[in-house]
Amino acid sequence: MSEKLAIKGSRPLSDEDRWQQIRLGAKNVLPASLAVMPLGLALGVLLVRSGLPWWSAPLLAGLVFAGSLEFLLIGLLAAVAPLSHIALTTLVVNFRHVFYAISFPLHRVKGQGAKFYSMFALTDEAYALTLQAERKDYSSTRILAIQSLFHASWTTSVLGGSLLGAMIPESIRGLEFAVTALFAVLAIEAIKAYRSVPLSMLALISAVAASWIAPQSMMVVAMAIFLAGLAAAYLLRRRTGTAQQAGGQQAGEAADAR
């Protein structure tokens, strides 16, 4: 019953409604938080073993908050790489977020400060978890709860890794698959929600083609192919609809003439 709670319109939320939305957001984000915990611990361990101070862990995780980019930044910071190199690396690795912005429900987030934070906290996991906001009518509070709780869990796990680095083994078999498994489940849920076989096939073809064309930049290339496919499908549907409308008008005019 609580999953069906929807906050319609623009009326202010009561305290009870707000806490209910936060609880729903926490329920949404809990699997993702658990899945990235091993990755966060590994990042914290790597940070300390690279010679960086432990207190830089929450700064890196909290201010950068970009997953795979943070692993690259540790090496760049340790090597005292030039700022231009760091900026270029950031652009290449996180360029996929440009595509996320196309369908992220930012218009549901209320307040300029909240919108700014929501754009900052737009990670892969947050995007996947809020992708169905249009269909499920997620409120601003629920979207922000998903993003902020995931942000907090990531920062905490990275900090934990930096403080407990000596106690954490270098590898635990199976944990490296946790994030992959998470996104596989999210993809299945998205397919169930949208029930679009052509859209799913387009995504699969885009991924396979990108892995063959540019395996080192698979995500960016796959997103570009997928976006091009969506644009082509939209133009084709629009042209078909225009042709059908024109045909209907001609048929109507012919009937009136008779």
Image (cartoon, rainbow, N blue to C red):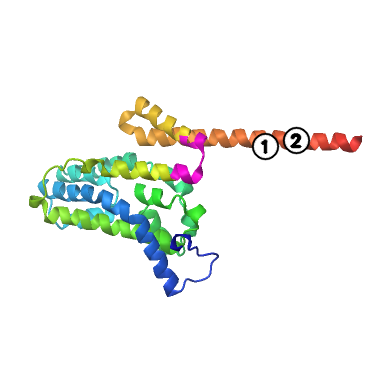
Q: Which residue is mark 1?
A: 241
Classified by dominant secondary structure, the portion drawn in magenta counts as helix
Rendered location of residue 194, percent (x, y): 50, 44
Camera sees residue 123: no
Question: Residue 201 or 61: which is nearer the viewer?
Answer: 201
Question: Residue 125 or 115: which is nearer the viewer?
Answer: 125
Q: Secondary structure at mark 2?
A: helix
Rendered location of residue 241, percent (x, y): 67, 37
Magenta stretch encompasses residue 220: no
Camera sees residue 241: yes
What's the residue type where badge 1 is placed? Gly
What is the crowding at mark 2: few (fewer than 14 residues within 10 Å), some, or many (at least 20)? few
Q: Which residue is mark 2?
A: 246
- N-terminal of the pair, mark 1 or mark 2, is 1
Point out the stretch of residues depicted in magenta: 190-200
Image point (22%, 58%), residue name? 156
The answer to whether residue 164 is left or right of residue 127 is: left
Q: CA distance from mark 1 to mark 2?
A: 9 Å
